[in-house]
Amino acid sequence: MSHHTENHTSLVDIILSPLGIFMALAFLLIFSVVAYLFAKPSLFPNLFSVLNMVNTKPNSSRLLPSPYPLPQGKQIFTMSHGKAVQGPKPSQIVINPYDPKIGAKQTITIDVKYETAIASGSITMETDEKTKKYALKKISGTNTQGVWETTITTDDTHDYIYNVAIEFVGADKQIFHGKLTLRAQ
């Protein structure tokens, strides 16, 4: 038992020694500085961006993971439809380029067919901060089977939200609605 008391006394002696007190104060100082920095990130904004652990969506206080890279260049999507689908039926969508930078042109080309004439087509591009509708123009083919296209200038980021809704209207007022999720959240 005296052996245990000696070890206990030795530990107390170490803690109460000048070195023990210095180490405790140093630990408290380091902990306080770290807690202060995390409470006031505006004092050292580059400290946290260098870590690149999380990003915030523009105009949001919600923390989001860093966006993953998207494929570069042209991407082609194939669509098939069951018999229950009404209206014009897109079969292929080409997005070129898939990951445009702000200010760059992007072309969306869609092959579509229908039993009756196709009256109109449009896409709605949903990105991080904007949702915009663009008319499609028939660039080749007939009224019932053709290639429709639009070229847009990219004016928003698509780091977290990137969807394309497709709509075609037949001359008989039948409407096709579809959506491509280009970046899942």
Image: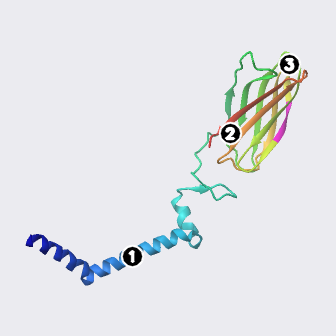
Q: Is residue 5 left or right of residue 97?
A: left
- Residue type at tag 1: Leu
Does the magenta portion include 170? no
Tell me if residue 73 can be seen.
Answer: no
How many neighbours does mark 3 have within 10 angstroms: few (below 14), some (14-19), or many (20 or more)?
Answer: some
Q: Which residue appears at 90% of the width and 20% of the height?
A: 172
Between discs 2 and 3, the one toward the N terminus: 2
Q: How many marks?
A: 3
Disc 2 crowd, CA 10 A, few/some/many (<14, 14-19, 20+): some
| Viewer-nearest residue: 35 or 65 | 35
Please name the residue that numbered disc 1 is placed on.
28
Q: Specify the color scheme.
A: rainbow
Q: Residue shown at 12%/70% (left/top)?
A: 4
Rendered position, 28 above or below 70? below
Q: Is residue 134 magenta?
A: yes
Indicate the secondary structure of the residue bearing disc 1: helix
Q: Position of residue 54 (x, y in %)?
A: 56, 56
Q: Secondary structure at mark 2?
A: loop
> Which of the two discs, 1 and 2, labels the residue nearer the N terminus?
1
The three-letter code of the residue at mark 3 reads Thr
Q: Earlier in the sequence, mark 1 or mark 3?
A: 1
Relative side of 46 to 18, left or right: right
**Residue type for callout 2:** Tyr
Label drawn at residue 144:
3
x and y percent of residue 74 in the render? 68, 35
Q: CA distance from mark 1 to mark 3?
A: 76 Å
Do tag 1 and tag 2 residues touch (Cβ < 8 Å)?
Answer: no
In percent of width and height, residue 83 lies at 74, 15
Q: Quadrant of residue 87?
A: top right
**Residue matched to label 2:** 98
Q: Is residue 5 left or right of residue 32?
A: left
